[in-house]
Image (spheres, coloured by chain):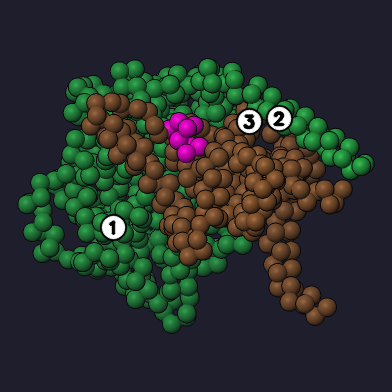
Chain colours: A green, B brown
Amino acid sequence: MFRRIFLSAAAALTAVTALTACSSGAPEEAPEEEEEGSAQTLTVSDPDYYTRFKGKGLSINVYNWGEYISTGADEGTLDVNGEFEKLTGIKVNYTNYATNEELYAKLKGGGAAYDVIIPSDYMISKMIKEKMIQPLDFSNIPNFEYIMENFRNQAYDPENAYTVPYTWGTVGIIYDTTMIDIPPEEIDWDLLWNEDYADQILMFDNPRDAFAIAELMLGYSLNTEDPEELEQAAFKLRQQKRIVQGYVMDEVFDKMEAGDALIAPYYAGDALTILEGNEDLDFVVPKSGTNLFVDAMCIPSNARQKEAAEMYINFMCEPDIAFANIDYICYSTPHSAAFEMLDEETRESHVSYPDEDFIRDKTTVFVNLSDEANKKMQDLWTEMKSAEDENTNKWITPIFLIFCVALMIFVLIRRHIKAKKDIF
Amino acid sequence: MKLKYFSAPYLVWMVVFIVVPLLMIAYFAFTNDDGGLTIKHISDVGQYANIFVRSIWLSLVATAICLVVAYPVSFILSRMEKHKQGTMLMIVMLPMWMNFLLRTYAWMTLLGNNGIINHLFGLVGMGPFKLINTSGAVVLGMVYNYLPFMILPLYSVMEKIDKSLFEAASDLGCSSGKTLLRVVIPLSMPGITSGITMVFVPAISTFIISRMLGGGSNLLIGDLIEMQFLGNAYNPHLGAAISLVLMVIILVIMTVMNQFDPDDQVLM
């Protein structure tokens, strides 16, 4: 998932618009006064808890997605890491990654000891299975009580022993309302297979998300490991390939905003940012169901400062901090108090916060697949992507071979001539 | 012999950052997760033959286009007055001052369906054409990005060809076509081979150009390797095996190329 790389670039340029971006196209006059009037402030529930390590010169290493925490760059917002350092005296070494896989590769390769990481659902279950993260001591994280019931004990961590959810979101379809004449209630995943919009459709450039859409259409589980079902899904994607303009991740921001394509599936939080850039666009989460993704805070097994890390996680769950973060990131929050602090527009937005019933019944969270299933999916994906249109495939290989043979013959003849010359 | 000591920093650098990583790639390619020896990953590479063929093909095409475009440019450049040469060379180098990613990103905007080029076509009532997300766009990206690497070695070789050689050739009755064939091309052969190497090698292993301009459906070897490390199925062993095979292919192609180098004659 590359979803946040772009944000880092975009935010650098448009740091000012970040606040308004969250309010999902809200009328501009209304909320602005309130926002300016109320600068974010911080009150913590139990100040004593946080001062335990003061003066000990501790430091923790936090490894998070890019642009995934409130930095206080906008006026009136909180600098979360700075506040934590001020409050606890623990120094935060904060670094970024761009994909779950990058995080995994870094941890797996060893040599890097992080104290807090924030991977996504399927990566969490993979890390639990490989014992790369350790159970949390929830007595050190009293603020866990704020986490909504819906987001506890998720499939990736059924006992909820390892994780504290940080953000969540759904996958839906961004589409151009001026060109696509279908009422939003009727839009479903088959729009991405609609021949009428050939060459105007973008698709996820990572196998897990792309297969999920095909599996949703076929009515399979999003976590299926059945080779037969995976083949079927790959076949579905292959049918789609002909009408897909391109397989993209972050490029979707540019392409949709510029009107280069009409339809693209993407993550809800980012979709709001894209919608800000082009008012013809709209975003819909298909009623037939979708993938729900959760990013949650964990502590790696080789963490050096477990208690301080738990303190950091608890701090992130302070209502004021959780609100400051979600206000900055624009994803959805699993934190009940932070949710209450959001403005009404956002709370009732179907993009950020769909009905609870829908979330419970129609969404699925990814869990890690077995190594065989992952490999199968990767192979099918590579095969699907590298398959050529039939007419080109026919001549490329033979011409290439002929070229090689001709080259060799030429070289041999040349050598022969040279050798002859040398005799005289 | 004191000079030897001056090369020590580079030797250390080379061992630590070139030789050791190469050995590690070879080690990874031939081992399993549990450290046992295996050739499974190497033989698995076979299933990606079509991606290899496409990568080699596209980078050969890009190299050929670079050569055809760069050869006359370098020749004209090398025959200019000295002070003009400097300015012209700077113009050749100018795009390289900008970040590689940024340049490729700019092509995305130019070639898009609503991009500038299609917009211009639209003004005269043509198009829109499908420009981006094609293998042509990938070749274009390669040519654009690597053209200076062809021009520079060609220019530096041609600059050294003495003007009197051309005069001698025409004195002895050579037509200009024959001068080109008998004088310019043989003398610029070292430039041609090093230019081809410098364009072909980065072109065959690129992945960002095909990702950005190929729309993700024109997989090249570089993409394939990247997918093994940062994709869904984390498989550094297969990734290392593909890299190793790619290195061998490049080595073979370079050996063939070197057959054209006139220096060989001396050696043989």
User: What secondary structure is found at the residue carrying circle 2?
Assistant: helix
Reading the image, the residue beneath label 2 is A404
| Marks 3 and 1 belong to one chain | no
Q: Residues within 10 Å of mark 3 (few under 14, many from 20)?
A: some
Q: Nearer the viewer, residue A367 or A53?
A: A367
Decide if residue B251 is on the left or right side of residue A84.
right
Image coordinates for residue A416, horizontal then vertical, percent: 85, 35
| Residue drawn at x 16%, y 44% as measured from the top left | A25
Q: Amino acid at mark 2?
A: Cys
What is the three-letter code of the residue carrying label 1? Leu
Chain bearing tag 2 is: A
Q: How many numbered discs sit on the rendered protein?
A: 3
How packed is label 1: few (under 14 Cα within 10 Å), some, or many (20 or more)? few
- Residue under disc 1 on the same chain as residue under disc 2: yes
B125, A414: nearer the viewer: A414
In the rendered structure, the residue with mark 1 lies on which chain? A
| Residue A82 in picture, x, y percent from top left | 34, 71
The answer to whether mark 3 and mark 1 are in CB contact below 8 A is no
First to last magenta residue range? B133-140
Q: Quadrant of residue B163?
A: bottom right
The residue singled out by tag 3 in the image is B53
Viewed as shown, does residue A175 lie left or right of B35? left
Query: Is the residue A199 above or below the residue A42 in the image?
Result: above
* Residue B139 in magenta stretch: yes
